[in-house]
Amino acid sequence: MRWLLLDQVVAVHRGKKAVTLSRVPQAPYSREVLFIEMMAQTGGLLVGAESDYKNDVIFAKIETATFTEPPAPGTALTVEASADGLAPEGGWIEGQITSSGGVVAKAKLLLMSVGRLIPESQRSIAFHDNFMNHFKVREKVTVS
């Protein structure tokens, strides 16, 4: 995963919910695609917490997705991903993006924990040290 769409990791409540902050990107193509990616990245934090971020996570499927008219580029967004009954191998994530004007996007996404994408690697590709340290992810994980 490339984590360039997230500005801040607010919280990860292991097995339940992850919250991040972002902004509506200035994009020459559909912002809805980037909204899906924001929800998947936030959900990835939730799935990754199940293995203490040792395993890589892949975005496997979009079950449903709905969007309202996107706010203007630069508008602050709150991205939430929640799960009920995550398994060690991943699970269904309910994503939602809101702005001060209300709900911007909702989606049901399947994210899977796949071990290591590069088997001989000692570290996760998705949760590399620069990302984990920059966003202080482990400090924001709580167990419910």
Image (cartoon, rainbow, N blue to C red):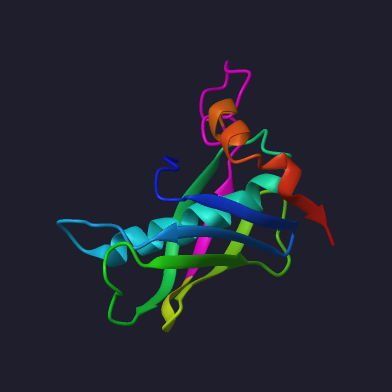
Q: Position of residue 6 (x, y in %)?
A: 46, 50
**Looking at this rendering, what residue extends furthest in the left direction?**
28
Q: Quick check: can you spot residue 45?
A: yes
Q: Position of residue 77 (x, y in %)?
A: 45, 67
**Looking at this rendering, what residue extends furthest in the top direction?**
120
In screen coordinates, is 18 left or right of 139?
left
In screen coordinates, is 68 left or right of 1?
left
Q: Is residue 2 magenta?
A: no
Q: Residue at x 45, y 41 (%)?
A: 1
Please tell me which residue lies in front, 91 or 140: 140
Q: Residue at x 52, y 30 (%)?
A: 125
Q: Is residue 124 magenta?
A: yes
Q: Quadrant location of the C terminus?
A: bottom right
Please tell me which residue lies in front, 50 or 26: 26
From which residue to which does the magenta span run? 108-127
Q: Position of residue 84 (x, y in %)?
A: 71, 70
Instruction: Kindly report the secondary structure that dominates the magenta region of the rendered protein.
Output: loop
Q: Residue at x 49, y 46 (%)?
A: 58
**Looking at this rendering, what residue extends furthest in the right direction?**
144
In screen coordinates, is 132 left or right of 27?
right
* 113 over 61 or under it: above or below: above
Please tell me which residue lies in front, 57 or 37: 37
Q: Residue at x 51, y 59 (%)?
A: 21
